[in-house]
């Protein structure tokens, strides 16, 4: 594969590959400014690679809404609080590019930078204040995670200057945090949230699923099954009762270890104590399957 120019290589189904992959911001900036000169709109899909159908759906949506889609593929070190997780994160650039070619050969470009291209020798996260959203759920369990996410997303917005950016609702807290980031920093990007993509088993698609051993892969759909029952119960039971029921269900699961189950207000992400009529709630869950951490969530009303 060549980087930074048209790729021309053999592919079993399709002889010519034309998705462009840029590894340096100077290169991609030139291409993007040519797009701007032609008044073309750009949708950015930030990813860490190991693409699955959920990512491709984001890219499709970006292309429905815009002339061009930029897919960034970058495993961002500053958002990992666990070195092992960072090291083991799947890196499959060649395959990712092939998958994107199945979506569009002409209108997608890939930005797959090195750590140095993004961080310019200073591998540090900026500090962000997201009005408290960062202290809930993932923020409690993954130290500094949202500073790392904010740092890379803000940088990508500065480099790509997209009209819109697309994020999956599987990382619902991240989506709300990115919305807060653009609001607080006056960044002129429209943030679009897209539905969670699921396997037939109900398991939310995630790049991490590829690392699940078969017995854990079989056990993992229990997460979504529990979320859907929790949603049913939420119609008649209190948030606390539903939470207790879920915690109890996981006690009998040998392969899945519940880290948290929380019912929260979608805007503040604060845990619900009393349900209120005109508020929207979501249930959020984090589970360990072996050493792999899986998250999911569901709208409750
Ligand atoms: O959701 C992800 O894959 C990452 O957190 C993101 C938004 C690409 C930032 O690295």
Image (spheres, rainbow, N blue to C red):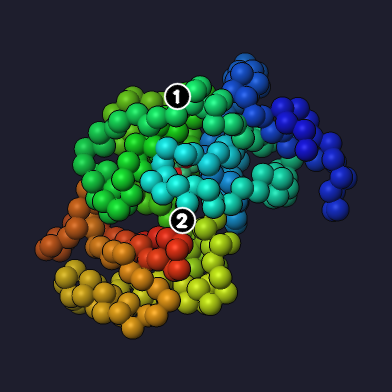
Say if 53 sits above or below 39 in the image: below
> Which of the 4 image quadrants contains residue 212?
bottom right
Residue lying furthest bottom in this view? 252
The quadrant of the picture occupied by the C terminus is bottom left
Q: How many marks?
A: 2
Figure check: 220 above or below 44: below
Please give left or right for residue 19 compared with residue 64 in the image. right
| In the depicted structure, whether residue 260 falls above or below residue 216 | above
Say which of 181 and 69 sits in front. 181
Q: Residue at the spot x=45%, y=68% of the render?
A: 290
Instruction: Specify the quadrant that holds the N terminus.
Output: top right
The residue pinned by badge 2 equals 195
What residue would you read off at disc 1?
122
Q: Looking at this rendering, what residue extends furthest in the left direction? A: 274
Residue 45 coordinates in the image, percent (x, y):
54, 40
Please tell me whether mark 2 sits on a helix, a strand or a loop: loop
Q: Nearer the viewer, residue 57 or 263?
A: 263
Q: Nearer the viewer, mark 2 or mark 1?
A: 1
Q: Is mark 1 within 8 Å of ligand 1?
A: no
- Where does the image place residue 17, in percent across and percent down from the top left? 80, 40
Q: Which mark is residue 65?
A: none
Q: CA distance from mark 2 to mark 1?
A: 35 Å
- Check mark 2 vs ligand 1: CB closer than 8 Å? yes or no: no
Q: Are marks 2 and 1 in contact (CB under 8 Å)?
A: no
Q: Identify the residue shown where x is 50% and y is 73%.
A: 216
Residue 8 as seen in the image, left or right of residue 234:
right
Q: Where residue 136 sits in the image (x, y, percent)? A: 24, 50
């Amino acid at each position: 594969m060549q980087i930074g120019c048209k790729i021309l290589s053999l592919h079993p189904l399709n002889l010519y590959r034309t998705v462009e992959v840029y590894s340096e911001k100077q290169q991609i900036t030139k291409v993007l400014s040519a797009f701007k000169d032609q008044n073309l709109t750009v949708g950015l899909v930030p990813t860490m690679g190991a693409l699955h159908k959920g990512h491709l759906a984001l890219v499709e949506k970006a292309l429905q809404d815009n002339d061009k889609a930029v897919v960034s593929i970058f495993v961002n070190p500053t958002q990992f609080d666990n070195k092992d997780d960072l090291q083991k994160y799947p890196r499959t650039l060649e395959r990712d590019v092939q998958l994107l070619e199945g979506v569009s050969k002409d209108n997608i470009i890939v930005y797959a930078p090195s750590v140095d291209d993004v961080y310019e020798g200073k591998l540090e996260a900026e500090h962000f204040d997201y009005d408290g959203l960062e202290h809930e759920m993932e923020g409690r369990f993954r130290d500094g995670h949202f500073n790392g996410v904010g740092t890379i997303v803000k940088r990508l917005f500065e480099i790509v200057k997209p009209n819109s950016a697309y994020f999956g609702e599987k990382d619902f807290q991240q989506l709300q945090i990115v919305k807060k980031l653009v609001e607080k920093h006056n960044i002129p990007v429209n943030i679009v949230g897209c539905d969670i993509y699921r396997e037939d088993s109900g398991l939310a698609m995630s790049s991490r699923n590829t690392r699940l051993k078969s017995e854990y892969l079989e056990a993992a759909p229990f997460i979504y099954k529990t979320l859907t029952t929790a949603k049913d119960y939420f119609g008649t039971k209190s948030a606390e009762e539903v939470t207790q029921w879920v915690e109890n269900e996981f006690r009998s699961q040998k392969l899945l270890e519940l880290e948290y189950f929380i019912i929260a207000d979608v805007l503040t992400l604060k845990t619900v104590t009393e349900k209120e009529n005109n508020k929207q709630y979501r249930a959020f869950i984090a589970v360990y399957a072996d050493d792999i951490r899986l998250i999911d969530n569901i709208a409750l009303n």
